[in-house]
Image (cartoon, coloured by chain):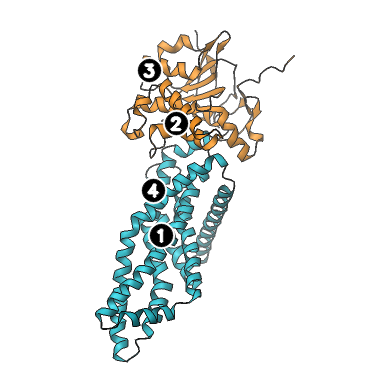
Amino acid sequence: MNVIGRLGSLVARRLSQLGALARFGFGALRALITLPVAGRAVAFRVTMNQIRFTAVHAVALIVLLSSILSFLVISQAARELGSIGKTEWLGTLLVVVIVRELGPLVTALAVAGRSGTAIAAELATNQVMGEVRALEAMGIDPRQYLVVPRFVGGLVSVFILMVLFDVVAVAGGLLAATFNGMAAGRYMDVVLQALTLRDVWLTVAKALAFGIVVGLVPSFYGLAVRRGPTEIPIAASRATVSSIVGIFLGAALFG
Amino acid sequence: MPDPLPLPLVFDQVLLSPRAATPFSLTVEPGETVVVLGEADSGLELLGTLALGLEDPRAGRVHVLGTDLSTLPGHERLAFRRRVGYLPAGDGLLQNLSLRDNVALPLRFGSTAASREVEGRVDVMMAAGRIGRIGGLRPAQANEEERRRTAMVRALAFDPALVVLEQPFDGLSSRVAGELLTLARGGEEAQGARRSALITSQELPPALHHRVERIYRLDRQGTLELEPA
């Protein structure tokens, strides 16, 4: 096969996979809408568990990443901007670089790496152990019991962690600014002046987009496993790589 | 005169594997326990899948409690499965749930009964399966007998008229196998067991031979032979 043929085949494969992922996403949405009344309490409990694993257990990691990143960026910027007398730009820098761009990106990547891998491996194990088939045999739609709680849990968790990241970033920036001789009141003034309603909406929109990626892609790859245990690490790896690519593509689209 | 009850399970001219020369036909009558023995590659494992409507037959028809599952749309097929108890090979218990939660899951998810009623039924079923004291264990913490008992109790969650059991007695003593068979049959009435059952396995403990109505052996060509009583 010539190079163009190979390239075409690769593109066709990727597009077919994208189509399957889109079908899976719509299936999950339909499963969410048609969730039976009796199953809602169970699905809610599983969702809360997912939020505990994905959001609550990741708080320390997000606080660490956010405080280091904001401290480094604001320390460097405060020195440089101070030397040219433009410390009022510090707020714009914090809002544009950290709150608007790096915060959502780093949060989504951390969740994809930490929880996306776990979700894919867990669902792949469910599949290999015959648990998915047993659910279907019991009259339980696996998408309603397994996918919907992870999808909703991922979405909510990414949103919570993004807000946390931004709050910690502003606090970390305050620490860095005061270390570099800037008054706390002045720092808060420039940050609040730079923050607009658009930043709030962008955070919400990014949380939604990245949450969908982090909640759906690992479930898709986890349940795609068919043959045996050797496919579990492959599914986890594919889920992580695809989530990372999806997050970066999403970030580029928002840019 | 009322209509007679539908037959619990009918396999009509079903092709179990591409190399099977003979289509498979079998009827499970009300109150009967029918055992089909065979090797792993005889297509035996497909019987449970077809009876639950997890797959449609490539040829022929399967009627479960009078319904051809292949004609039902997805959500109706899913709801219909609650009328059939199923114990899959290898138990199929959810590893991240306790044994009690495994038993309760189909009821909590698929029943409109009040929470207290559901938990009460779970208590009764756990006691009947002699797993009441180990309900807090995860499947990985339980032994094979306890896991199999749990899977059996879970299969009976909705008190189904028909149960399909795959290799239910493998690795168990005759005493435990006998207890599980009693649970599966749901008690005895004048015309047979209260519940109909299809059991697929490679072997059946000899002590149970006299407690089931019919035993068949399925070979790789798809031929079904009745074993002598």
**Chain letter of the residue carrying label 4:** A
Residue closer to the observer: B148 or A6: B148
Residue linked to disc 2: B103
* Three-letter residue code for mark 3: Val
Chain that the image shows in orange = B
Q: Earlier in the sequence, mark 4 or mark 1?
A: 4
Residue linked to disc 1: A241
> Tag 3's secondary structure?
helix
Quote the CA–CA distance across marks 4 and 3: 35 Å
- Mark 4 and 1 residues: CB-CB less than 8 Å, in contact? no
Quote the CA–CA distance across marks 4 and 2: 24 Å
Residue linked to disc 4: A121
Residue A125 image position (x, y, % from top left)? 40, 43
Quote the CA–CA distance across marks 3 and 2: 19 Å
In this image, B186 relative to A72: left or right?
right
**Chain letter of the residue carrying label 2:** B
View extreme (front): residue: A185
Closer to the observer: label 3 or label 2? 2
Residue linked to disc 3: B176
Residue closer to the observer: A40 or A17: A40
For label 2, the crowd category at 10 Å Cα-Cα, with few meaning under 14, some 14 to 19 and many 20 or more, is: many
> Tag 1's secondary structure?
helix
Closer to the observer: label 4 or label 1? 4
* Three-letter residue code for mark 1: Val
Closer to the observer: label 4 or label 2? 2
Q: Decide if residue A177 is in sight here.
A: yes
